[in-house]
Amino acid sequence: MAPNLPTNCPSMLPSEVAANGNAAKRSRQDTEGHHVIAVANPVHYHADNKLTVLVDMDNTLCNYEEAFERTMKERYPEVGLVGAEKRVNWDITLDYAEEHREKVKSVAGVKGFFLGMKPNEGAVEAIKAMDAAGHKVLIVSAPDPNYTAQCSQEKYQWVEQHLGAEWAPRVILTRDKTTIRGDYLIDDKPHCDIGAVKPEWKHVVYSQTYNTKCGDKSVLNSWADWKDVLTVKAPLDCTIAKNPRPLEDELYPTGINFSCVFPSFNQESIVKKTLAGLCKQKIKSDFKFEVVIVDNNSTDDIDAIYRKYRTKLDLTLVQRRKLENTFSVPSARNMGIQQAKYDYIIGMDSDVILNEHFLENIYQKLSKDRSTPYMVTAERWFVSTEGFTDDELLDDYTVTEKYPRILSKANYFKERDNRFSHGNIVANVTKGWQPWAYFYGMHTAFPKKIWEKIGGYNEVYDGYWGYDDIHFAWEMTVKGGCVPLVLGGTEVFHQEPYGSEWVPVGGVVDKLGTSNPRLNKKDNPNWQRICQTIPGYADWKTDHYQKLAGDIVTL
């Protein structure tokens, strides 16, 4: 029998064996040595096979030329106009004699100038058609540097007037569009791709007389042609390769060392076995690790746990002030990571026992590629440790073989981790189809620098169960540039809460109906929040839930 594998652990599904070959088979037989089960390409992911399209305003969405000529005639009739068909410079002042340039500049400062621009033919219809097709459309414009406040205000007003008030939050005003992430930027400026960073978007030039020499860039001559120019296909390729934003600093400036961080609330017997499992890590390589516990007002004797294990581990206990709601998980994770002294975070829950080769295996993977920001997960084995002590685990790790395999409420009462049995994790992570949906807080490891880059876990999810981890994994992927990786050899044991009347594999379960929060999604504000945040997640996850258990309520 392989060490640390439950005796009643089910075998691989035939479909997954076929998909993953011998490596997938090994993941259930031996945890010594790592192997890649699924890895995503470093691309800009699309949550539901849709594009992010950035659209400029002046002389792209809006008819700047008409507004300029009209205002010039009203203000400075003595200045001869340079017609739009004769323009040769993007900067309109350069098309006029030097003695007229101050007057030309002043036109943009006339009250109502930007608000009075007319839409270019077909522009508003095209923008709304993109939105209706499910693409994410952002209005990205540079405010006039000489009249920034007035220009900015009027551009927001223009969008509300022609597109609707709901479009105002989609307006981004910036002088450097290279800093905005997307797939395409439609813009009349010939060289808007020069800026602080290499843009990940492809520049589509909106045709004007002054931008005819743009090399091999795509050109949009008419808004009616937007589908052809943006190469929109049905269905879209779900992993359109872009330029992931590079991390300027090293991922591991102090070396590859680990901070194991988890929040805690009561269940002291379970927490002790989690720490005992960390004590039993088999380490061959030259790395260090620490453990950080953030306690959310436990009424158990967390101090006694700390006193027992502080001599066995490099252990930090953070005890939070009185909380209004002890289910404050995202803020606890952030607090723990803020205390972490090492560069790679092992995100855990207080009920997780790492397999004894976990840290060594993940070190071996990271040390072979120090420049790729991997975000790692693997399979969970659901067990009951009730009746077993942490001292037994400290004495001999193979006691884990005796932990009975169970049908856990946390796993929707499935025999195997549902991400593997029903979730199609291998194929979906590989092709970039909602890959973040598989990275749960109790078992996700990641570089601390990327956590810092995205601003950590979103604490708006505090107070309710779930989905903070999915939001975090999504941001780590699409904003932070992490590469999702399912890594064999980093499997973990998930301990069932004591007193939960656990059911052995093959037993009959009482799902508890809507009193089980995992079955009743509609009353969980976090479910509503994540569905509103990640495009396509609601439909995708609802379909997964129906395959998993038809009695899950999501509406």
Image (spheres, rainbow, N blue to C red):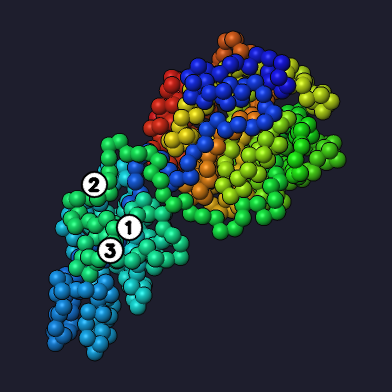
Residue occupied by mark 1: 203
> Are circles 2 and 3 on residues that touch, CB within 8 Å?
no
- The residue sitting at 61% across, 55% down in the picture is 250
Q: Residues within 10 Å of mark 3 (few under 14, many from 20)?
A: some
SS category of the residue bearing label 2: helix
- The residue sitting at 54% across, 52% down in the picture is 454
- The residue sitting at 60% across, 15% down in the picture is 10
**Res 322 visible:** no
- Residue 505, quarter of the rendered image: top right
The answer to whether residue 490 is above or below residue 176 is above
- Residue 267, quarter of the rendered image: top right
> Are circles 2 and 1 on residues that touch, CB within 8 Å?
no
Could you say which is closer to the camera, residue 407 or residue 353?
A: 353
Q: CA distance from mark 2 to mark 1?
A: 15 Å
Looking at the image, is mark 2 or mark 3 earlier in the sequence?
A: 3
Q: Nearer the viewer, mark 3 or mark 1?
A: 3
Question: Is residue 254 rendered to the left or right of residue 209?
Answer: right
**Res 19 visible:** yes
Please name the amino acid that badge 3 sits on: Cys
Looking at the image, is mark 3 or mark 1 earlier in the sequence?
A: 1
Please name the amino acid that badge 2 sits on: Lys
Question: Is residue 79 rendered to the left or right of residue 421?
Answer: left
Residue occupied by mark 2: 227
SS category of the residue bearing label 1: strand
SS category of the residue bearing label 3: loop
Quarter in which the C terminus is drawn: top left
Residue occupied by mark 3: 214
Q: CA distance from mark 3 to mark 1?
A: 10 Å
User: Where in the figure is residue 244, as x and y percent of width and height?
Assistant: 47, 51
- Residue 330, quarter of the rendered image: top right
Q: CA distance from mark 2 to mark 3?
A: 20 Å
Please name the amino acid that badge 1 sits on: His
